[in-house]
Amino acid sequence: KTQPPSHTPQQKPKEENRGVTRDIIISKLTIPCSYYLERGYSKDILSRYDVGLCEDRNKKMYGRAVVPIYNAHYEYAVGFTARSINENYNYKWIHSTGFQASHYLYNYWFAKDHILTSGVVILVEGPGDVWKLEQSGIHTSLAMFGTDLSDQQLSLLYSCGANSIIILTDSDEAGRMSSKKIEDKCKRLFRIFSPALSSDDVGDMSEKNIKQEIVPIIKKAMEVNV
């Protein structure tokens, strides 16, 4: 495996224990969030990821679907991101105060061991893409919280033992530009797969289509790694 370039951070970002454990989070949210149940996500998946509605009017994330982001060892939350559940919003997604999304990859805590075993990581834009892949039995996806892959996130990809990256950003203009930038940034370090999918967004794909279109790419990437 090629050594990372000198400008790429090779140390994982320092994690600060903020004392927000999973049991506290679960007690504060209405889980699972009905908004995502109505969008076709399973109760089991939403409960596994502690995705719930914030109903505390005194909180910044009131009325939003709250998504906790856990540390690498699944011990405590390093931050939260939250989606508006209606169209009357100033921002569709907001982060908790102080959370530096560029320093983390969503689902790292669950996916890292699967990535180490398979050598393959699937890179997606958001948590919803991760959940849909998990529902289909795919456990190696990580989300960037958007379309940009930071140097810190690149360092995490390298440290988790991935040899191949399957880029599954959205098929809109922003997603296509993102895919090209990620490929340019990562091609010296990883084998890159950037397949065209029938859906604009992984989160909108059916389990049938995921198994027909994405699973074969994973198998191909794993064969290349052997």
Image (tube, rainbow, N blue to C red):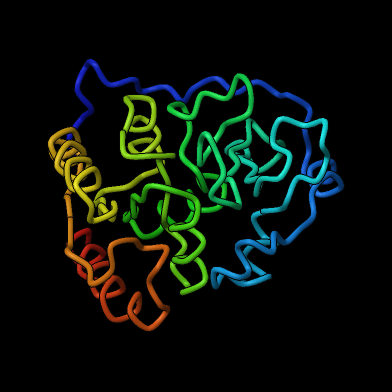
Return the x and y of residue 124 as percentages of the image width and height: 36, 51
> Hey, which residue is sitting farthest front in the picture?
88
> Residue 14's x, y, as percent?
55, 20
In this view, 156 is above or below 136:
above
Residue placed at 19% from the left, 47% from the top?
173
Image-quadrant location for residue 21: top right
Describe residue 31's horizontal placement relative to residue 121 as left or right: right
In the image, residue 24 lies at what x, y percent?
84, 41
Return the residue nearer the eye: 224 or 25: 25
* Picture mark count: 0
| In this rendering, position of residue 159 left or right of residue 23 | left
Question: Residue at the location (51% across, 35% down)?
Answer: 91
Residue 193 relative to residue 14: left or right: left
Q: Is residue 183 above or below residue 95?
A: below
Residue 10: image quadrant is top left
Query: Where is the C terminus found, in terms of image quarters?
Result: bottom left
The image position of residue 30, as x and y in percent, is 79, 55
- Compare residues 138 and 82 and report the one nearer the observer: 82
**Foreground: 147 or 55?**
55
Point 67% across, 53% down: residue? 51
* Quadrant of the frame with the N terminus: top left
